[in-house]
Image (cartoon, grey):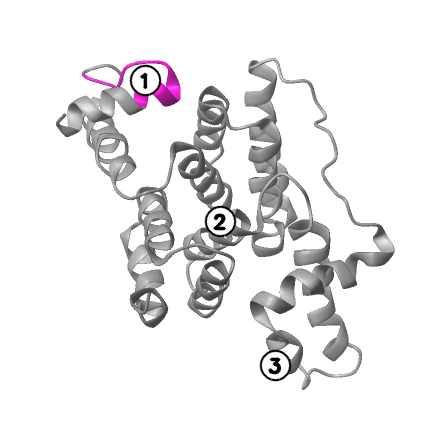
Amino acid sequence: MDRIEKCSEKFGKLFGGKPVTSEGTDPELMRILQRFIFGEVSYTGSLDDRMRELITVTVLTVNATLPQLEAHTGACLRIGVTPLEVREAIYQCAPFIGFPKVLNAVAAANRAFEKAGVSLPLPDAGCVPDERRYEAGLALQKPLYGDEIKDRYTWLPGEFADAVPRFLTEFGFGDLATRTVLSEKERELLTVVMLAALGGAETQVKAHIGGAMRAGSTAEEVVCALVHAMPYMGIPRLFNALNCAKDELSAK
């Protein structure tokens, strides 16, 4: 198949329709977009459609591009991604982009859920009692990242030397990474994409690429995830992510 045929196949699978030919006010742009994303990028690398759509949902959440997020939530449901998986990909963006963007993203996803007849609210997915947030979070954080953050910020004044690394452990890992639905490997791979999409977070991108690979992702899977995110976040952010972690990605 050529890329036009591939685009038609993938677009139909995800959205249940046909790609643009001459419809709408900007059909030329849509043809370029669709043929590149769905006819080329979506067929490059090893990741399956489920993981690719979760990557797309993550980048669209980071970018606060809500109409596209709503459309891709619908695509997720069409290919068998569960509402809980979509919600989890959005929820785990909170430590990185803040709660307001996540709340807006959840609202967009919920509109797609309601259109599909999904009953809301979705079931809870947390499994750690409040009093065990730190211990449970540290049990996930330390094997992947050690004590780097705690050691790095001992210079902070007063109670902040303890509070800042503790907040990361309790919130980022205890509240979110311990939740069910997504595996540790999936969460770490989505975190790499999330940080790359943010821009300006290359130190964290490099650290989380290492974490993703320790969690079980291959270098090819990491590169595939970043390349799949590229049409949504831009080529410069792809290159920044690849360049900052060249040693990690080329060593495997």
**Which residue is at 19% across, 15% downward?**
22
For the view shown, which residue lies furthest in the bottom direction?
155
**Image point 62% across, 52% down: which residue?**
98
Task: Give the residue at the far right of this rendering.
Answer: 131
Left or right of 16 in this view: 77: right
* Kind of residue at badge 2: Leu
Q: First in sequence, mark 1 or 3: give its number.
A: 1
Residue nearest the viewer, comparing 81 with 162: 81
Residue 122 visible to an observer of this rendering: yes
Quarter residue 33 falls in: top left
Task: Establish if 95 lies above or below 112.
Answer: below
Circles 2, 3 touching at the beta carbon (< 8 Å) = no
Above or below: residue 67 compared with residue 221: above
Q: Nearer the viewer, residue 242 or 198?
A: 242
54 shown above or below 170: above
Secondary structure beneath dot 3 equals helix
Q: Is residue 9 left or right of residue 152?
A: left
Q: CA distance from mark 1 to mark 3?
A: 49 Å
Image coordinates of residue 247 in percent, x first then y, are 33, 72
> In which image quadrant can residue 144 be found?
bottom right
The residue labelled by disc 3 is 152
Q: Position of residue 180 (x, y in %)?
A: 67, 42
Tell me the CA gap for discs 2 and 3.
25 Å
- Which sits earlier in the primary sequence, circle 1 or circle 2? 1
Image coords of residue 159 (percent x, y): 80, 78
Task: Kindly identify the residue that appears in the image at 76 percent across and 71 percent down.
Answer: 163
Report the amino acid beneath label 1: Gly
Q: Position of residue 245 (x, y in %)?
A: 36, 68
Magenta region: which residues?
A: 11-21
Q: Secondary structure at mark 1?
A: helix
Give the residue at mark 1.
12
Q: Which residue has dot 2 on it? A: 190
